[in-house]
Amino acid sequence: MQTEARVGVAVDGGARKLVQPQKNQLGTVSQLLAGGVAGALSKTCTAPLARLTILFQIQGMHSNVATLRKASMRSEASRIIHEEGFRAFWKGNLVTIAHRLPYSSVNFYSYEHYKKLLKMVPGLKSHRDKASSDLCVHFVGGGLAGITAATSTYPLDLVRTRLAAQRNVIYYRGIWHALQTIVKEEGVLGLYKGLGTTLMTVGPSIAISFSVYETLRSFWKSHRSDDSAVVVSLACGSLSGIASSTTTFPLDLVRRRKQLEGACGRARVYNMGLFGVFRQIIRTEGVRGLYRGILPEYYKVVPGVGICFMTYETLKMFLADIGSA
């Protein structure tokens, strides 16, 4: 998280909420399998936009102001095709898929666990306003689950960023080579560069996605109860993903840059804390620099959520038919 946290993560939060398991229909293993496959397919289909987002986010680290002003989605996509080949749009996608299943598993189990613990809190348990109490459980539980999942799978997230950030010169030849090289050159702690910023990003991102999704769905159902559940889920999931991305994007940009500190044998760019990095980006790139790459991030929200949801629903019915056979 997506952020991918992604989420994805970030968009991840909305998609994950759409595929929250229903225990009366599928076993836990089937739920995780369906969710993992749906997430992997969604990530693969939107990988070109995800890579463009990362490339834009890190441009300010080693580019001058004149170069940054010329950057656009069209020019960057054209550069990738002509210099790296069409397949380069999927650089780092394999590690994204490898990261997806353990992340989803940890996120699912920890969310259910945290939700049960929070419901046992005396203040929430006896709260008169049930809607407000449920919102708090979704918000806090979703944030804690995201933090737990992000921490446990963080090395894969860092490797994904470094593989996707490579252009013409290939320094890391794959997942295993990247892990070995990072440990050798930067130590074991090198696998956790930017973790603090990531936790500050993933927790709020998923918490916002969960809470916005639940609030919008409840509001929608109370006013238009006859609308299709699929349409409601897709619309609410997309809007929650956009809200999450907009709110946490500056932090996500900083975490990507932190993950690349010292990568490929280069010298460190930011020898300061989080707020120092923010100040330097604003001073050299302006406030807009904090949102560099948000356009392709927005573009992948609706297709990402739609593909994830529809794939999950299809697999859910398929696995249910197998189970009842």
Image (cartoon, rainbow, N blue to C red):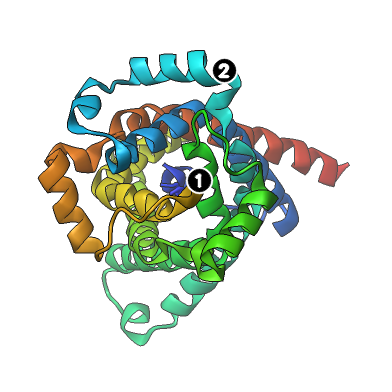
Q: Is residue 230 left or right of residue 222?
A: right
Residues at marks 2 and 1, CA–CA distance in whole angstroms: 18 Å
The residue pinned by badge 1 equals: 162
Element at label 2 = loop
The x and y percentages for residue 289 are: 20, 39
Residue 303 appears in the rendering: yes
The x and y percentages for residue 125 are: 37, 80
Marks 2 and 1, the one that precedes in the sequence:
2
The x and y percentages for residue 73 are: 34, 20
Give the residue displayed 60% in from the left and 49% down from the top: 100
Give the residue displayed 44% in from the left and 62% down from the top: 193
The residue pinned by badge 2 equals: 85
Q: Is residue 148 left or right of residue 44?
A: left
Element at label 1 = helix
| Number of residues whose C-alpha sits closer than 10 Å to that of mark 2, classed few (under 14), some (14–19) or many (20 or more) | few
Give the residue displayed 31% in from the left and 33% down from the top: 293
Quarter of the rendering containing residue 126: bottom left
Q: Which residue occupies the foreground of this view, 192 or 311?
A: 192
Q: Residue furthest bottom?
A: 122
| Number of residues whose C-alpha sits closer than 10 Å to that of mark 1, classed few (under 14), some (14–19) or many (20 or more) | many
Amino acid bearing label 2:
Gly
Q: Is residue 268 above or below residue 165?
A: below
Q: Is residue 82 above or below residue 185?
A: above
Quadrant of the image containing the C terminus: top right
Q: Is residue 116 left or right of residue 292?
A: right
Residue 222 appears in the rendering: no
Q: Is residue 251 above or below residue 273?
A: above
Give the residue displayed 16% in from the left and 52% down from the top: 280
Quarter of the rendering containing residue 71: top left
Q: Which residue occupies the foreground of this view, 261 or 322?
A: 261
The x and y percentages for residue 309 are: 54, 36
Q: Is residue 166 above or below residue 116?
A: above
